[in-house]
Amino acid sequence: MSMNTFKSWRWSPKNKSSLSDVGVQGTHGFRFRLNQLPFAAVICSAMLCIMYRTTKFQYRHTQIEAELLPFDTVKDLTSLELGSLPRGIIHSRTDLELNSLWSQSITEVNISSDHNLLAIAVGIKQKNNVDIIVKKFLTENFTIMLFHYDGNMDGWSVLDWSNKAIHVMAQNQTKWWFAKRFLHPDIVSIYDYIFLWDEDLGVANFDPGRYLDIIKSEGLEISQPALDPNSTDIHHRITMRKSKKKVHRRVFDVRGSLRCSISSRGPPCTGWVEGMAPVFSRVAWHCVWHLIQNDLVHGWGLDKKLGYCAQGDRTQKVGIVDSEYILHQGIQTLGGSSQKKTSSLPESAKSRRPSFDMRSWIRRKSTLELQIFDDRWKKAAEEDRSWVDPYEKQRSWFIFQRYTKLKKAKEN
């Protein structure tokens, strides 16, 4: 048979049935290719699965790295904003240390040594008390930052340390407003601890150096000095000083509606500090700064959630230092005293009540902010399906253990 005859027979339309028969019965090559199709599909599926898992692992690894090194990670190097710069020239963080305008030497801050920050919202009426506070902290080489909420910054220049402090002025703003805008974690990353205090605190029985030694040895990420029992305002018993202790982390109280016992796992029985004199470690502040809501300036509700930033069990990582304690004078300065004021109120408030009490207005706004904050937390917890409340889980486990022990005791 000639070659032409063979080609004609192979591709002739009338021989399709013959070709099908060959594929089924005799031609091993054709039969082999048909059998390989399911195998190839399995191989492709396996490769896609491996690529997906690898990509997911790399993404998660990047997330973990960013969480562990929040201040040293330079983000978006490949972006248009930074991609044109050589990596070594990029400084991803800064600090609040002063650098003289006319100094002939260029000195970088030694990040290996201890650095701590005291930030206070201040008004000129409390200048003398703030002077006492600051002088105590300067002996321990603290960086001082004053947030001037009353617009009077010049009146502080008579103090000998004033030119060594950082001054920020904004009329009628709160401590949390200032902190959110001027204490970004990348700016304060060199500071081991951040003291974010009110101005009306007595420090006769407080030593910053000893306090730092205690919170370091106790492993406290979030803390506050205990309040002298003679303080004007003590809102929660957990903050009151226990004279025979160095540190306490919980309170036992069964009076009224409050039931604080060994089984209590959260505020205000344990894992709690108040907003007047909190102290945060660097890593805790990185979390707390993100917790502060940009538009909720009074910070109400924050104290209940600070324990989530304790970098571990809040019943252990949050505490009150008794041996170094302060006196809360309870002076209401921001917004004025309880006297009648209308000058800085919204027009709607003036029209409703010409002699409106400024303190009442602030309290109502704070209460509203508390409700908004609680609603936001609840909504965020519901929408983030990957988030698990560590303390709800811990509470359930504690209840289960307690139930098991009681059951065994009854059986015995």
Image: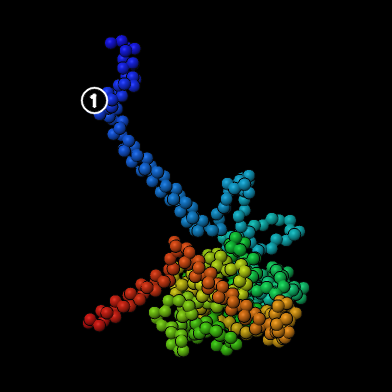
- Which residue is drawn at the image coordinates 37% and 73% (left, top)? 396
Name the foreground residue: 277 vs 106.
277
- Which residue is drawn at the image coordinates 26% and 25% (left, top)? 22
347 relative to 51 in the view: left or right? right
Residue at the far top in the pictured view: 2
Q: Quadrant of residue 97?
A: bottom right
Whether residue 212 is visible here, answered yes or no, is no
Specify the quadrant that holds the C terminus.
bottom left
Specify the quadrant that holds the N terminus.
top left
Which element is circle 1 on?
A: loop
Q: How many badges with numbers are in the image?
A: 1
Indicate whether 356 appears above or below 79: below
Indicate whether 18 appears above or below 121: above
Name the foreground residue: 250 vs 117.
250
37 relative to 272 in the view: left or right? left
39 relative to 345 in the view: left or right? left
Protein image colouring: rainbow
- Which residue is drawn at the image coordinates 33% and 16% (left, top)? 7
Whether residue 66 is visible here, answered yes or no, is yes
- Which residue is drawn at the image coordinates 27% and 29% (left, top)? 31
Residue 233 position within the rendered picture, expressed as x and y whole percent measured from the top left: 58, 86
Residue 54 position within the rendered picture, expressed as x and y whole percent measured from the top left: 42, 47
Say few, some or many: other residues with alpha carbon within 10 Å of mark 1 (under 14 / 14 to 19 / 20 or more).
few
Name the foreground residue: 401 vs 355.
355
Residue 122 position within the rendered picture, expressed as x and y whole percent measured from the top left: 68, 76
Indicate whether 116 appears above or below 348: above
The type of residue carrying mark 1 is Gly
Residue 253 position within the rendered picture, expressed as x and y whole percent measured from the top left: 45, 86
Residue topped by disc 1: 26
